[in-house]
Amino acid sequence: MVDETSIFIGASRKPDDSYQRAEELLLRYGNRHGLVTGATGTGKTVSLQILAEGFSNAGVPVFCADIKGDLSGISMMGEAKDFLVKRAEQVKLDPYQFQEFPVIFWDLFGEQGHPIRATISEMGPLLLSRLMNLTEAQEGVMNIAFRIADEEGLLLLDLKDLQALLANIAERADELSARYGNVTKPSVGAIQRTLLVLEQQGAANFFGEPALRIADIMRTTRDGRGAISVLAADKLMMNPRLYATFLLWLMSELFEELPEVGDLDQPKLVFFFDEAHLLFEDAPKVLIDRVEQVVRLIRSKGVGVYFVTQNPLDIPEKVLAQLGNRVQHALRAYTPREQQAVRTAAETFRPNPDFDCATAITQLATGEALVSMLEDKGVPAMVQRTLIRPPSSRLGPITPDERRKIIAESPVAGQYDQVVDRESAFEMLQKKTKEAQDAEAQAQQQNSGGSRWTIPGFDDVLGTGNRRSSNRQTVAEAAIKSVVRSVGSSVGRAIVRGILGSLAKGR
């Protein structure tokens, strides 16, 4: 039916609803990206599940987000239920074998999986500004903050580092405005207040070290299967902007770290972006342009990106044009926007003369979809009305005890549990402030502890007068200037940042 070079998706149907042929995704085109769309309850999660199973069995690591907890069942062996066996017979899946898959659970909050973190520097000013919903003026201040951190060698690892740097910028607002443009204390204050809100929403758990190593989501097992990294996102979805920003950061990290490999027999990693509308909702044009650029270029790194969303209109046209493998579940067409979505979805497929695509989209049953995968030479196949195959793993969520057991036996168990708080901007700025204060106190003590007698015309040199007759700087002034020079020269160097403004590693 299918061979080891493809993933079995399901079986297409003839106009009389009889079996037509197997529909499959060719692994050599797995890095050409994809789209899974459909209304709530039409089977998108199951389609994501069988795609993840197929890639894993082919030795391709997978990263996906579990929005409702249902996807966690991929870690456990499926059970022979009547409706699953019946569907297997309808699509001629013989033998229908049940499997459990190698899963690594992750959680930004460290509750339902291994903690997952990134540093402030890796996130970069563009994504941070998006996460914090900053105005244009505030985003300008954020870019200046990162510029200063780069020039003065200040490591930005966690939220307190960024808070300390912003406080330092507020104190130096006049000086910095002369160098970089208008830096106002109200703008800095607004960013600081937003950071406080972000911290209260739990983002402090995400920023810090040890940061996620990309290699840990690209693991394979001893039997050659790809590990499936599942991000627990049910709680994370309470802060949808953090969810979208995190996944976008991860995609940009993959782009920055992985080498060019061209077209391979199969992808090196497949990345599923569920609830993809959150990525583009209210996003500035510059961010959408860069996402489109990453999606277009990351293919040459051997990474396939698959967007999962309810409505194809959620994806910008330039990004939509990059998605070659498509699974379209049912859409409702009650409102004008929904009707437009149906037309848009239908127009993106290569037409099939056997049926009207727009009409079929509104009539698809649960577990049924319009499928068009890339065929030989990367040409989209004619759209087919397809019954999606049943999964081999469990349908539905696992129990808390099952989750704890998998986490304890994980290949990354214990590696990310303890937070590492090394010297960074917070400690460095504190140290510099203390050194300047100590130098000033010492100078004041020397001035106040001088001789009580004076010589006419020379009282400010030997005595305790308030004027200096020479142009020589005081000890305090010399110490402060020394600190400023050391900040700029000791470890200060320009840090190269990547396509989304995050730190470009290894460059």
Image (cartoon, rainbow, N blue to C red):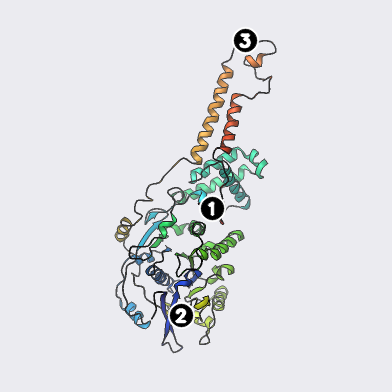
**N-terminal label among 1 and 2:** 2
Q: Could you tell me which residue is drawn at 48 percent across and 46 percent down? A: 157
For the residue pair 23 and 237, the one nearer the viewer reads as 23
Locate residue 218 relative to residue 245 in the image: left or right: left
Could you say whether the residue bearing mark 3 is in a helix, strand or loop? loop
The image quadrant where one finds the N terminus is bottom left
From the image, state whether disc 1 or disc 2 is nearer to you.
1
From the image, state whether disc 1 or disc 3 is nearer to you.
1
Q: Is residue 245 visible?
A: no
For the residue pair 4 and 466, the one nearer the viewer reads as 4
Pointers 1 and 3 in contact (CB under 8 A)? no
Residue 104 appears in which quarter of the rendering? bottom left
Mark 3 residue crowding within 10 angstroms, few (<14) / some (14–19) / many (20+): few
Residue highlighted by disc 1 = 502
The residue lying furthest to the right in this view is 457
**N-terminal label among 1 and 3:** 3
Q: Could you tell me which residue is drawn at 62 percent across and 10 percent down? A: 453
Residue 402 drawn at (x, y percent): 30, 61
Q: Amino acid at mark 1?
A: Ser
Residue highlighted by disc 2 = 364
From the image, state whether disc 2 or disc 3 is nearer to you.
3
Mark 1 residue crowding within 10 angstroms, few (<14) / some (14–19) / many (20+): many
Q: Amino acid at mark 3?
A: Trp
Residue highlighted by disc 3 = 453
